[in-house]
């Protein structure tokens, strides 16, 4: 997404290094306690050494399976959950502030810039407060406005997200999921933040409503110059909204790239497996089997070496010993896949592409890279349930 | 259904009607005007609407309001002064109210009563003296009483003339009117329940919320304290604590003392429930949302946690009142609670301690009936409120 048209001149020149957030080595561990004395016997490493860089005005999609630490990462970045280690530098007003070093009070004041949209539109609105109280709370708490000014601001917010001012007197139970999510968005916008972390904001909604909310989020991004971290498990949603995508597995980021590049040229076996699981609206195409084996390991007892090796189809003995690092595989495209694994992926992909050119996806035809679809032979007896119905 | 319903249809229809089920109609949405109004309702109004549909709960509430009214105006409603002794009418059974006499219909009246000693058993017996009628009068003059120290009056709601025997629920062994004593004693029992619940609720809510919200060491300390209190058997600890109250204290101080003792022993259960609820609400998304908005702990506790808990608090309060009433009765019954000249339902019941008394003077059990009704009414009310709040109190 490009910088908004309101101030094009500075945005165009500074865009490349106009960084808003730098996360370095972020770790969030939850202790596992056992026995009468509640002794700490281990840690769930929900976020285990994450590096992220976010440019102003962009949308970073954060994807991964359930339990991979997406939500924890999102919440740790704004210290809703206290991270265990690492640094979070937030650029605000020409300053570079390390959120981890802030006291409670300073952090509370800075929350005006860092807002959060919740996954569940039902539990995130206090059922005892009416919409006006819910949306105005951030303004009241921060003493931004009061009286008729407050009312005016809340009314314009609620209009901006597509609701009517006479909805303000109502209570959350009177709204549908999509409307509730709009209320949540209005609340997040109230303080005019610069960074919004949206935690699967559409996954609890109907598919028809998802599109409306996504469009609303995009419009608001242009209008208020917002930066998003968009957490999701649905790759098609992420592709739609993100400029860049980070793929998470067991608390680590295994691959980041511009979203088009990631979809065309997945360079980590996990990303490839995730993409193979995306349902295709074309009913004639046989859905492929996800190309990995087993289930997510217990995050309290993560495998040594490359965390993905227990499920990877290209695993070799060295994978259990050597810890891979993020390295650039193409400009702006980083992956944690080890060299041998990447090689085998590429080889298989080109082999498949040569074999079945006619079946290659539309996407693959207009790009020079390999097709994302046939990276490995589908596991026998592919599940042939109709793809788009399963999604509804 | 068509004009010629089949046999099966007719039978189903009949069956449905017998079961009081309506035939399924095309779903009729409420008229739009009403629906619009409904949407603006707050949680409280929704809860109230639901509560009104629960008959047992409403009945409980009405009974409690009635009892509250009676005990508030106890002196006015009672026919005699609590401590007036009618020595010639000791242990008199409940008197009957008549309308008919030998010479026709009258306004409700009671006959005069003559007491005598049964030569065989040596017990006092009473017969109606059919020659003298005492018409029951309302807003009549009787013993003087002081209305909460605001004014003095001798106008009583009901009576049969100054000095005449009028004992609708009989008398005790000193010839004191049981109805009057139940009314005045009820005030003590009822207010002990309310005050004790108020005190223990304040304490319990505070401790419970602190314990649940902050967790950790504080939580551990509060919970262990509660466990220590609860690991003592309750009656001995109540007895021990109330034995600490100096016997020379005036009545109202003893009363407050009893309230304090009950609250000190009883807050743990409330605190635990509130802690559990706080724990659940503390981690809910809307509390997180408030934190994102920049709210401080105080605001989160009072604007988010407390309101979300209020329905729960009301329910546990309502359900806790009867147990306090019972505790007070237990203490007074054992002679460690309210002391004469004050009286309470438990103290009145202590007159009916042995089987000999029960067999001869069964009306002395009336205070027990009052306790029973009050406790049941509170329980019905509490259940009703709980059911009404359940689907909204996330």
Image (cartoon, coloured by chain):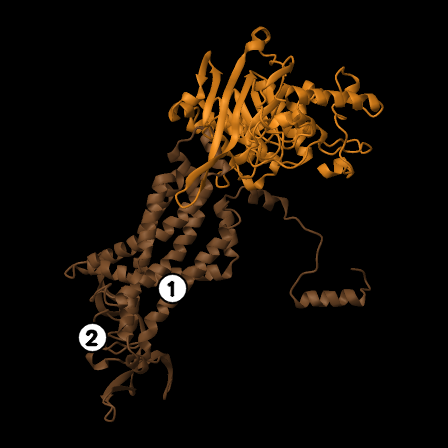
Chain colours: A orange, B brown
Assign a secondary structure to mark 2.
loop
Question: Between B299 and B277, which is closer to the camera in this rendering?
Answer: B277
Crowding near the residue tagged with mark 1, few <14, some 14–19, many ≥20 C-alpha atoms within 10 Å: many
Q: Relative to A45, is A280 on the left or the right?
A: right
Name the chain letter of the residue that bears numbered label 1. B
Question: Where is A225 relative to B102, above or below?
Answer: above
Numbered circle sitting on residue B85: 2
Q: Nearer the viewer, mark 2 or mark 1?
A: 1
Instruction: Report if residue A267 is visible in the image.
Output: no
Q: Residue furthest left?
A: B248
Q: Quadrant of residue B377?
A: bottom left
| x then y, percent, for residue A206 | 66, 36
Q: Residue at x 72, y 68 (%)?
A: B14
Placement of the N terminus of chain B among the 4 image quadrants: bottom right
Q: Where does the image place residue A359, in percent across and percent down from the top left?
A: 83, 26
Front one among A302 and B46? A302
Q: For mark 1, what is the residue? A: B374
Residue that sits furthest to the bottom in the current view:
B120
- Residue displayed at 29% across by 67% down: B346
- The reply, left or right, for residue B21 in relation to residue B272 is right
The answer for which chain carries disc 2 is: B
Residue B102, image quadrant:
bottom left
Please state if B254 lies on the left or on the right of A327 as rendered.
Answer: left
**Measured from the top left, where is residue A46 in percent x and y?**
52, 31
**Residues tagged by mark 2 and mark 1 found on one chain of the structure:** yes
Q: Which mark is residue A132?
A: none
């Amino acid at each position: 997404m490009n910088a908004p048209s309101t101030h094009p001149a500075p945005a165009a020149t500074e865009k490349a290094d106009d960084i808003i957030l730098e996360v370095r080595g972020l770790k969030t561990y939850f202790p596992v306690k056992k026995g009468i004395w509640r002794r700490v016997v281990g840690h769930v490493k929900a976020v285990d050494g994450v590096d992220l860089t976010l440019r102003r005005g962009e949308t970073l999609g954060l994807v991964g399976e359930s339990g991979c630490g997406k939500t924890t990462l999102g919440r740790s970045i704004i210290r809703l959950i206290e991270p265990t280690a690492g640094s979070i530098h937030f650029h605000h007003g020409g300053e570079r502030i390390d959120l981890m070093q802030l006291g409670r009070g300073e952090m509370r004041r800075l929350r005006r810039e860092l807002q959060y949209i919740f996954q569940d539109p039902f539990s995130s609105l206090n059922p005892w407060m009416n919409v006006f109280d819910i949306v105005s709370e951030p303004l009241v708490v921060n003493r931004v406005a009061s009286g008729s000014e407050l009312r005016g601001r809340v009314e314009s917010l609620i209009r901006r997200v597509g609701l009517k001012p006479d909805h303000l007197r109502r209570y959350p139970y009177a709204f549908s999921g999509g409307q509730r999510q709009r209320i949540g968005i209005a609340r997040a916008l109230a303080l005019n933040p610069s960074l919004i972390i949206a935690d699967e904001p559409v996954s609890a909604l109907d598919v028809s409503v998802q599109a409306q909310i996504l469009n609303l989020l995009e419009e608001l991004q242009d209008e208020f110059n917002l930066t998003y971290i968009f957490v999701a498990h649905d790759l098609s949603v992420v592709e739609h909204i993100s400029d860049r995508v980070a793929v998470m597995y067991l608390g680590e980021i295994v691959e980041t790239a511009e979203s088009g590049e990631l979809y065309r040229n997945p360079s980590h076996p996990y990303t490839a497996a995730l993409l193979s699981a995306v349902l295709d609206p074309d009913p004639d195409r046989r859905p492929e089997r996800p190309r990995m084996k087993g289930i997510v390991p217990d995050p309290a007892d993560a495998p040594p070496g490359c965390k993905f090796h227990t499920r990877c189809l290209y695993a070799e003995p060295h994978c259990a010993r050597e810890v891979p690092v993020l390295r650039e595989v193409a400009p702006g495209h980083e992956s944690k896949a080890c060299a041998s694994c990447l090689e085998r992926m590429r080889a298989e992909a080109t082999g498949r592409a040569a074999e079945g050119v006619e079946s290659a996806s539309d996407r693959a035809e207009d790009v020079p890279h390999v097709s994302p679809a046939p990276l490995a032979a589908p596991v026998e007896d592919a599940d042939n349930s109709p793809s788009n119905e399963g999604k509804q | 259904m068509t004009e010629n319903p089949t046999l099966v249809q007719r039978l189903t229809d009949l069956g449905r009607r017998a079961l009081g089920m309506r035939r399924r109609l095309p779903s009729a949405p409420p008229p739009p005007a009403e629906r619009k109004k409904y949407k603006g309702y707050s949680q409280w109004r929704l809860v109230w609407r639901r509560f009104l549909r629960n008959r047992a709960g409403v009945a409980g509430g009405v009974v409690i309001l009635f009892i509250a009214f009676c005990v508030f105006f106890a002196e006015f409603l009672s026919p005699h002064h609590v401590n007036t002794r009618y020595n010639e009418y000791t242990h008199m059974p409940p008197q009957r109210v008549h309308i008919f006499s030998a010479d026709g219909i009258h306004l409700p009246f009671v006959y005069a009563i003559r007491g005598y000693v049964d030569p065989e058993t040596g017990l006092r017996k009473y017969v109606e003296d059919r020659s003298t009628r005492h018409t029951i009068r309302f807003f009549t003059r009787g013993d003087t009483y002081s209305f909460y120290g605001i004014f003095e009056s001798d106008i009583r709601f009901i009576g049969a003339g100054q000095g005449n025997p009028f004992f609708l629920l009989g008398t005790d062994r000193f010839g004191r009117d049981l109805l009057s004593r139940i009314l005045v004693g009820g005030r003590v029992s009822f207010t002990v329940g309310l005050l004790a619940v108020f005190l223990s609720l304040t304490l319990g809510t505070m401790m419970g919320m602190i314990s649940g919200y902050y967790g950790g060491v504080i939580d551990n300390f509060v919970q262990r304290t509660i466990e220590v209190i609860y690991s003592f058997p309750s009656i001995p600890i109540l007895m021990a604590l109330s034995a600490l109250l100096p016997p020379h204290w005036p009545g109202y101080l003893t009363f407050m003392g009893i309230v304090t003792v009950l609250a000190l022993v009883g807050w743990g259960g409330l605190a635990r429930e509130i802690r559990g609820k706080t724990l659940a609400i503390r981690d809910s998304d809307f509390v997180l949302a408030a934190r994102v908005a920049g709210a401080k702990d105080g605001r989160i506790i009072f604007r988010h946690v407390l309101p979300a808990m209020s329905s729960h608090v009301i329910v546990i309060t309502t359900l806790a009142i009867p147990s306090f009433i019972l505790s007070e009765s237990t203490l007074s019954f054992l002679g460690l609670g309210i002391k004469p000249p004050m009286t309470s339902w438990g103290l009145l019941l202590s007159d009916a301690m042995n089987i000999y008394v029960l067999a001869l003077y069964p009306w002395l059990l009336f205070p027990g009936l009052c306790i029973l009704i009050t406790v049941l009414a509170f329980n019905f009310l509490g259940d009703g409120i709980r059911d009404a709040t359940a689907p909204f109190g996330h």
